[in-house]
Amino acid sequence: MFTLSRESTIDNLRAIVAGLTLRLFTDDVEPDSAFTLADLTEASGGGYAPIALNPLLWEEAPHKRLAYPKQRFTFTGPVAGGVVHGYYLTRDGKMFGAERFREPWQVQVPGSWGEVSLMLGEKP
């Protein structure tokens, strides 16, 4: 089997992270590779806003991966439905990928917050 070098893998990852936006979803689902934007409901209300990711902030991490600084969402009130189940990344109006949180965020009062740690690349 042909194996990409670490350098080549990191270069490829850096090329695909441009233009990504971090978003939160409120559906109680387990996303998989067949998911599209139509399958998820983006969080709304409570001061929620998606975060445009700066491609220059991705840093090389072990195991042919890139890591992004932890992103914090702070809410001014409840989101619609009161619960956030996970996050997803989009680019150019298309789904890039999604992940469900281990524990959903209860977002029902002002000052509620949650953080997302992003890591892209090969599984160790």
Image (cartoon, grey):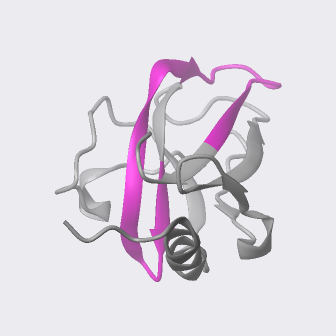
Q: Nearer the viewer, residue 4 or 90?
A: 4
> Residue at position x 25%, y 71% from top?
2
In the rendered structure, which segment of residues is drawn in magenta?
88-117
Q: Main secondary structure of the magenta part?
A: strand
x%, y% of residue 13?
Answer: 53, 71
- Res. 102 in view: yes
Q: Is residue 10 above or below residue 111?
A: below
Q: Is residue 20 above or below residue 123?
A: below
- Res. 45 in view: no
x%, y% of residue 46?
Answer: 69, 39
Q: Nearer the viewer, residue 90 or 43?
A: 90
x%, y% of residue 122?
Answer: 42, 52
> Residue at position x 57%, y 22% from top?
105
Left or right: where does residue 71 sit relative to residue 16?
right
> Residue at position x 75%, y 24% from top?
112
Q: Nearer the viewer, residue 28 or 63?
A: 63
Q: Quadrant of residue 72?
A: top right
**Quadrant location of the C terminus in the rendered image:** top left
Q: Quadrant of residue 28?
A: top left
Please tell me whether residue 67 belongs to the stretch shown in magenta.
no
Q: Quadrant of residue 37?
A: bottom left
Q: Nearer the viewer, residue 37 or 17?
A: 17
